[in-house]
Image (cartoon, rainbow, N blue to C red):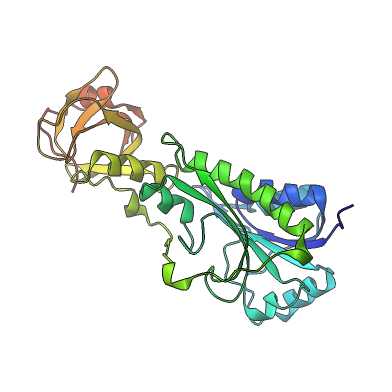
Amino acid sequence: MTLRRKVAFFGSPAFALPVMEAIGQHHDIVLVVSQPDKPVGRGNKITPPPVAARARALGLPLAQPAKLRKNEDFLEVLRSSGAEVAVTCAYGKILPQSVLDVPRFGFLNTHTSLLPKYRGAAPIQWALIDGEEVTGTTIMQTDAGMDTGDILLQETLTIQPEWTLTDLAQNLSTQASRLIVEALDGLETLVHTPQNHDLATHARMLEKEDGEIRWNDSLQNIINRYRGTYGWPGSHTYISGKRLKVLELKASSLARAAEAGQLQGTSELGALVACSDGVIELLQVQPESKAALSGADWVKNHQIKTGALLGK
């Protein structure tokens, strides 16, 4: 019979919920640590992170410290929880050594890449933007560096060509949920494998402008950027100096017949725009301060002429 471990769980967004729930089915979560509640939306309504909201609903002990460094009150909360091991999943804060030293078995992190590749805040996004065909999940022993700790478990995941950020994140969350339970079940027998730091790459946090369509890019690179920025920051372009959100796009079978960024006309639903080696079909767009509509209706309703140039 597998020993039930006392676990402190550190996480914040919805991505971390399946991981937390999987741990709770097999082990005892004695403390949940999440980011503080913050204003959300146009009304600035104070809203808890999804993990904090779920912890409250389940009646689990919850801490939401604004900072971790030199926070003796939080250290005492963590110590008094009796956690033997802690698990982090998209928590969102760097853990100081004083926190890492508290649990007997330290901290395990569920990182959504095949470390040492794509260390950092946005490994799922950059794997898609870079056109990777395979990624995966790494369970690592957290140290004071940025995803530099020893690898404990690692498993690959094939990226399907049609997957967006939402699809890949869901599949990686499922994979991470299974692997972290496996790691906790075999905690005392896990083999620690140091990372090869010479092979490390960095996956920086995305900014809004990372979603801008680069019309001089190849068709495949544009599709990849759309997949990797899906949801946030989302894809966009510009026309006559105004931002145009691109909510849905796909590759067109038409051959390029204009310079990159030029509108070539419309299909039944889409607006056809040339890129460096093909044509992108904008299926759904949203002009500034306007409702979303099909690309074809946008061209018609806003009287966009064939030959109009998109982009800055």
Residue 277 shows in the view: yes
* Residue drawn where x is 61% and y is 74% of the image: 143
Tell me where residue 266 sits by quadrant: top left
**Residue 102 placed where, x, y %?**
75, 76
**Residue 26 placed where, x, y %?**
81, 50
**Residue 45 placed where, x, y %?**
58, 50
**Residue 72 placed where, x, y %?**
73, 81
* Residue drawn where x is 25% and y is 38% of the image: 219
Is 266 drawn above or below residue 13 in the view shown?
Answer: above
Q: Nearer the viewer, residue 213 or 154?
A: 154
* Residue drawn where x is 46% and y is 61% of the image: 117
Residue 59 shows in the view: no
Q: Nearer the viewer, residue 43 or 104?
A: 104
Residue 91 lies left or right of residue 132; in this view the side is right
Residue 11 lies left or right of residue 255; in this view the side is right
Is 269 drawn above or below residue 191 in the view shown?
Answer: above
Q: Nearer the viewer, residue 96 or 246?
A: 96
